[in-house]
Amino acid sequence: MKKLFTSLAVLASVSVVQQASAFDKGDIIARVGAVNVNPNDSSSNINVGGSDLGIDVSVDDDTQLGLNFAYFLTDRVNLEVLAATPFTHDVDFGVTDPLGTGTQLGEVTHLPPTISINYYFNDPASAFQPYVGLGVNYTVFFDEEFTGANEAAGLDDLSLDDSFGLAAQLGLDYMLNDKWFLNGSIRYIDIDTEASFRLNGTKGEVRKIEIDPLVSMISVGYRF
Ligand code: NI
């Protein structure tokens, strides 16, 4: 009987130790969920052959499958990589149908991998584990294309420059048990690019496109 109590006491102390810390140095976590990229965009005007058309462009939002991995460098600090399936954004003229080709100018696809260092500041015993993070983003644009109507009007060769910028985030892990947790995060990413194209062979550009999105993610996480 005494042996049983001793075993129970050992078990209890083990589970207390396990609950005492949400994350530990050396932990690897993975999160999977939905991630939305919502631009706070602004741009300079479309310029063709040196003349300003007086029309800017806008970029709409998109939601994709988000994946997120982090490695704990200490009990409170992790290094995190945000990845996702490619985002496709409609690019619209800043005014309604200015060229008689519809309001949509085209679409672009991009991947915005982001690496962040995050700091957890709450009591490690709490189920609520908020964190703040700072990181860098590299956004690669591809499959840039004009709509059929704009191509028929003579627009082609659309290309957007890659972007390198800072990212900042706030997030919360809610521990369901020792392994599983829920996560919500919102981050700001500085994404700026420049577009080039041709209109009937004449070179055109939009020199400054600020996309600067809020990127929000809701996910389920697992601690390995
Ligand atoms: Ni910016």
Image (cartoon, grey):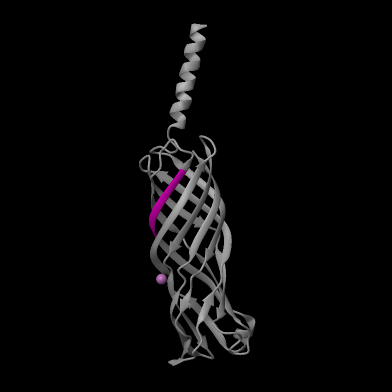
Query: What span is in magenta?
Result: 129-136
Residue 163 placement, left or right of 101: left
Q: Name above or below for residue 66 compared with residue 14.
A: below
Residue 130 placement, left or right of 146: left
- Which of the pair 89/188 is nearer the observer? 188
Any magenta on residue 130?
yes
Q: Residue furthest top?
A: 1
Residue 151: image location, x then y, percent: 60, 84
Residue 31 placement, left or right of 71: right
Residue 167: image location, x then y, percent: 40, 61
Who's the residue at 53% across and 89% down the image? 199
Who's the residue at 52% across and 37% down the image? 179
Q: Name above or below for residue 202 compared with residue 222.
A: below
Q: How many marks?
A: 0
> Would you identify the image quadrant in which residue 99 lies?
bottom right
> Would you identify the image quadrant in which residue 193 lies?
bottom left
Q: Name above or below for residue 74 compared with residue 41.
A: above
Q: Main secondary structure of the magenta part?
A: strand
Residue 74: image location, x then y, percent: 35, 41
